[in-house]
Amino acid sequence: MNRINGRYLILLNSPEQKCKSGPVDLVFIIDSSRSVRPHEFETMRKFMIDILDTLDIGADATRVGVIQYSSQVLNEFSLKTHFTTEAMVKGINEIIPLAQGTMTGLAIKYTMNVAFTPEAGDRPKVPNVAVIVTDGRPQDRVAEVAAEAREKGIEIYAVGVARADMTSLRAMASPPFEDHVFLVESFDLIHQFGLQFQDKLCGLDMCVESDHGCEHICESSPGSYHCLCLPGYTLNTDGKTCSAIDLCAQGKHDCEQVCISSPGSFTCDCNKGYTLNADKKTCTMIDYCSFGNHSCDHQCVSILNGYHCKCNLGYHLLDDGKKCQPIDLCAQGKHECEQVCVSAPGVYTCDCNKGYTLNADKKTCTHMDLCNSVEHGCDFQCVSTPGSFYCICPEGQLLQDNGKSCGTCKSANIDLVFLIDGSKSVRPQNFELVKKFVNQVVDSLDVSAQGTRVGLVQYSSRVRTEFPLNMYHTAEDIKAAVMKVDYMEKGTMTGLALKHMLENSFSEAEGARPAARNIPRIGLVFTDGRSQDDITEWAKLTKEAGLTMYAVGVGKAVEDELREIASDPVEKYFYYTTDFSAINTIAENLKLNVCPAESQGEIENQLLSRK
């Protein structure tokens, strides 16, 4: 027998008996164009009825629909309209031909989109078969729509009569064409296709009707059969029996160690002491160290079916095979150090006694002259000692607290914050003179992290910390930072600036040293005009907080405000000049951290000159 989309249809020997088939949904697509003469259309009617007589018609067996077409498509009855042969025959006999053009492509599209739909009675998982009968060349395109229909699972038989075009028939039909394309010379011979079509639908199933002898599977073909084997087996030369395929024996596997065969397949395994990896093919030696019960001091080394302990470089394994002991080359005398041997497990390094330096050979030592090998910073003279040095001063001078500078007296360490006026009345060229004034004062200071610290705040209508006390620790760094300060311009909020200095600039967070250390805190206010806010409260609070306040005024600075800012005695802490060009004179006379006796006479002379 033949199989339609996997379903077997069985035709009984007697013409009167029905073709006992599995369910099929069959649609006839009949050409009723004007070229089909009335007696020829009657022949097509009889052709359809003859085929119906051989089919097992029913709602659960074979369903049949009929479509006629010419220039349009007309559904005569759908797959769900009739479920008896008698009703279908009656419907076919009532068809009236359209007698117009030949739009075969339109008819195939209608069949695909309407006739074979659930709404029209099409059943899921039931083969769809369409039989097209035409006598002429289509007047529209059929290849694309027929291909789409076949892709949707519709098996198409194309029957051409008389003037039909073979190329068009092959474009419509399902492959193979020898089973699905039929061309007859006249409508009188169309019954010949009917007989062949019945054979295709209802051939004898040799697997069912004969003693085939297949061990596993029998597959029918028209008038014959052949045997097949289940997956994993191969058909023997007798064509009936099957043998298991041993892929392991054939070497058709990729197991690294052990191949275990099953029919047509295999699984991999591993030798003792190994475990199968996630790829199910390769093997990895079992890591006994990973079990965590090895007790090795340093390293556990897995071996096949066990492990052993190993020590890190510079250690040796003790007799218990688990503990490790460092190798002390210094204690064993296995070194070449001239003075000091510093041991590490399995290695050593050489060092020297205090006052000596290690030579390039990393073994011998040379006496170290630090005065010639380091930046000692001594003002006058450096004296080397073993491993160290000290500074000395010329006769008549004293070594200062920093241990490097020389002077006639000991200088004091201070925390100094400059509060400079950056208002628009100062003008840019004068602001540059103010920065030089600050740097001139810095030059007179002993600046270092442990000595004098310097911070800078600029103010106008607002206040900005240019750098805090803890940012720079050398005079050079401070002076460079001062010269990079940008001029703010705008107003003169001296009171706001005093508040900022008291609350922020002299905080430990910004580098002021704790008050318990009694390091003087000095503020130097530089302004050229009257404050635009009240200074009285904050001038008073700064002095109550223990700050020593210097007030330096230029030009239109208000003397009463300067005196209010300055500490007592005011004459010692208040300075004024009419011209910015003269502020360098104030800087020369302003000695903030030198011996009091050294500066007192100069201060008195300066006060007299400014009166």
Image: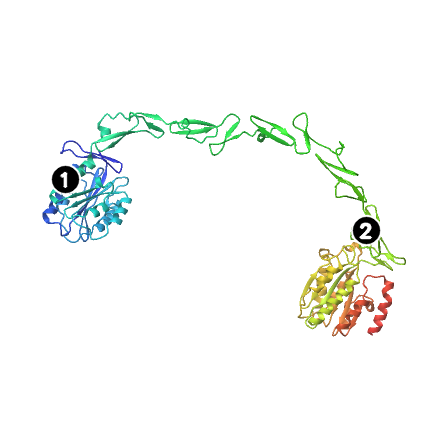
Kindly give the residue lying farthest to the right in the view shown: 396
Q: Amino acid at mark 1?
A: Gln
- Is residue 501 visible from the viewing direction of this image? no
Q: Which quadrant holds residue 451?
A: bottom right
Give the label on residue 192, or none.
Answer: 1
Which quarter of the rendered picture does the C terminus lie within? Answer: bottom right
Question: Left of 311 or right of it: where is 14?
Answer: left
- Is residue 259 visible from the viewing direction of this image? yes
Q: Nearer the viewer, mark 1 or mark 2?
A: 2
Q: What count of labels does the image hold?
A: 2
Residue at screen point 85% across, 68% down: 602
Does residue 43 sit above or below 10 in this rendering? Answer: below
Between the C-alphas of marks 1 and 2, the distance is: 125 Å
Q: Which quadrant holds residue 606?
A: bottom right
Does residue 241 sit above or below 492 in this rendering? Answer: above
Using a 10 Å C-alpha cutoff, classify the residue at mark 1 as few (fewer than 14 neighbours), some (14 to 19) or many (20 or more).
few
Identify residue for label 2. Answer: 371
